[in-house]
Amino acid sequence: MLFTRPKYIDWFLEKTDSEVKIESGETVSVFRIAHLDDDEKLNEWAKHILRHYRSDAQIKSGADANCGGNKSKYISDFIIKPIEKKDVSGDFGEIIFCDFLEYVLDYEVPRYKKLNTLPSNPTQGIDLFGFKLKTTGSNEVVFMEVKSRLASKKFNAVGTSIAESINREDTHRAFLLENARLHYEFASDMDMTGKITLLQSSDKPPLRRTMAGIITTADECDTNDFIGVKIETGKTCKIFALHGLELWKLAQSLYERACL
């Protein structure tokens, strides 16, 4: 499924200039999450989130089959159940980082893991990956683990994200790529199938990078928030922290708007 660039991304994230490091000395790239009271952008964002669970065509056919063509009722009855923090926090964070990876860092990001699931059903394995296919030099693929703490002001969970990211075995990454390839092959998306196949090629192995991300509800972020967080000697991992106020309310509002 193709995703267009959502309008919210242009105002949502603001890169901070402060230098933030973890205890082992690596830099954390910190982005502040802005708030904007704009119904048009928020409604479009909500539909963008919804498309990670069902395509527009699936919503139409499901509404026709079950709800007399009423899309809002179908969405609320069959996709988005009564919302609780545990149901949407992880999904919201992963979708935000998919958008961040694609629209801020310029990777191509396959978005298939949540399709035909519910927000309350966590997906297994590596959280997400993105890639860059290059005409010269090595292709690049990045694997990312994400922790969402929408009701917390603490950042220490990024340590778990880092550990999960750098300690994933090559077999885990290989399974992720193969599952993605099979998904797009089954969906007859031969363009994405071909791109992932290139990443799997032993003739031109891509550079493999690891990233860790955390999204949390906090007004500020500095080095003191990462006391005790370290990267093992000899390992590398790029770290990103996104923070803003009342993120749980924002996520809840967006999932509710998806039913409108």
Image (cartoon, rainbow, N blue to C red):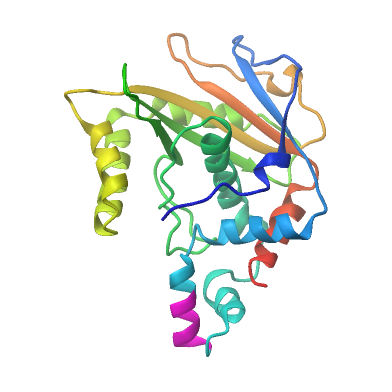
| Up/down of 113 relative to 13, above or below | below
Can you say which quadrant of the picture contains the N terminus? bottom left
> Which stretch did the figure color magenta?
60-67
Residue at 48% x, 54% y: name it.
122
Seen from this angle, which residue lies furthest bottom? 68
- Along the line of sight, the residue nearer the viewer: 205 or 82: 205
Q: Which quadrant, please, contains the C terminus?
A: bottom right
- Expressed as whole percent of the image width and height from the top left, the position of residue 26 reads 59, 12
Q: Could you tell me what secondary structure mostly forms the magenta stretch?
A: helix
In the image, is 88 to the left or to the right of 15? left
- Front-lying residue, 122 or 209: 209
Question: 63 above or below 217?
Answer: below
Q: Left or right: 158 with respect to 118?
A: right
Of 162 and 46, nearer the camera is 46
Is residue 59 part of the magenta span, yes or no?
A: no
Picture quadrant of residue 29: top right
User: Residue sitting at 29 percent across and 39 percent down?
Assistant: 196
Residue drawn where x is 24% and y is 53% of the image = 185
Query: Whole-percent x and y of residue 216?
Result: 70, 39
